[in-house]
Image (cartoon, rainbow, N blue to C red):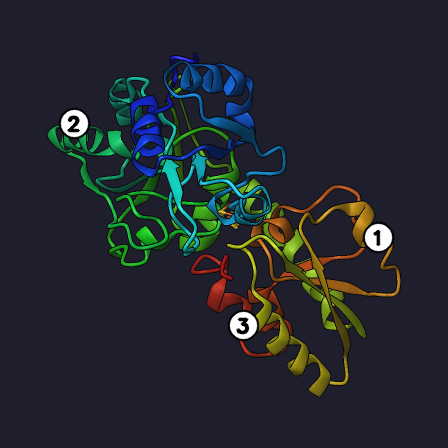
Amino acid sequence: MARLYDFEFDRVIAEINERRAKKVLIQLPDGLRPYAFQLAEKIQKINQVNIIFSGDSCYGACDLAIRQAKELNVDLLIHYGHSLMVKTDFPVLYLNAKINIPIIELVEEIIPKLSEWKIISLVTTIQHTHQLKDLANSLNMKGIKTIIGKGNNTTIFDGQILGCNFFVLNDLPEEVDGIVYIGGGNFHPLGLSISTGKPVLIANPYNLKISLLNESDVMLLAKKRMAALTISKNAKKIGILVSSKPGQNSLIIAEEMMDKLTKKGITSFLIYLDEIKAETLNNFSEVDAFLDTACPRIAIDGIMGVEKPIITIQEMRIVLGELKWAEVWGRNYISF
Ligand code: SF4
């Protein structure tokens, strides 16, 4: 088994036993799928439960495989890598897939890169939230005031962020100089930047590299979004994308948006789908633009090969004149 991830094997066995489960569906994000068979074999050495893996996407807890679980008539859905997001009466065991690499070593790397920053907010994904407090204490001892935002019912751990949810930074004090993100890649840092307007330092625990989110990447994104808005403002036909994924389904908002567009003389129809793919969208060749009411990052980060612009719900509010760009860019640009 991968030593990096904590598969919480004991909790899995305890839950299966407690529920007297005979058949379970296991949902793993892509990064954990290489360990799927090892996990199943380990479980079956203790309990001869029938195990089925979900082979469909598992982008987040928004993507909970409840429909599959019901179709397969399993007793329990085991979902790895995310925390509760979708309310359901179906039994689900969430396992965070914590990563236990020693992130405390980052302190010495972070300090010299903070420059003039004296007050920071510390955030990360669910895999490292259990380590944030120790990191914050070490930074505090070095004279850096470190704030960890409180979790809520969608990001349940303090300091936890999702690609579409930066709730823990909602009450960010003005005097915070910047945000330190523990993790790799630009996906979450870009979301942090356009949701808070603060500079973002990326502290990568896997290679101990520390880098400031490049301002030119943020500017490039702003230009792309403005270009999509400009085309969408002149659109006469809009395809409204509605996701069947339980945590991405915004049918009510989609219908509201359709009403508003109709009142403005713009033709729109709902397009209901599970996966948003270029080949699917491009076949709707009559539309001038798409409104994405599913995961907002699909529109913001873009999908290769889509021929028409895709805008988010928040961006549609700008198109409709309900919001101004400056009111949301760097504040709460990402919103369902
Ligand atoms: S960013 Fe998209 S995929 Fe990730 S949790 Fe949010 S809706 Fe789901």
Residue 159, relative to residue 289: is it above or below?
A: above
Q: Amino acid at mark 3?
A: Lys
| Residue 125 visible within the image | no
Which residue is farthest bottom? 263
Residue 145, relative to residue 223: is it above or below?
A: above
Count how many numbered circles sit on residues in the image: 3
**Residue nearest the observer in this picture, 88 or 118:** 88
> Mark 2 packing: few (<14 Cα in 10 Å), some, or many (20+)?
some
> Mark 1 packing: few (<14 Cα in 10 Å), some, or many (20+)?
some
Pinpoint residue 33: horizontal percent, then vertical percent: 55, 23
Pinpoint residue 177: horizontal percent, then vertical percent: 29, 46
**Residue nearest the observer in this picture, 110 or 163:** 163
Residue beneath disc 3: 324
Label located before the other in sequence (3 or 1): 1
Residue beneath disc 1: 282
Q: What secondary structure is marked by label 2?
A: helix
| Residue 89 visible within the image | yes
Q: Amino acid at mark 1?
A: Asn
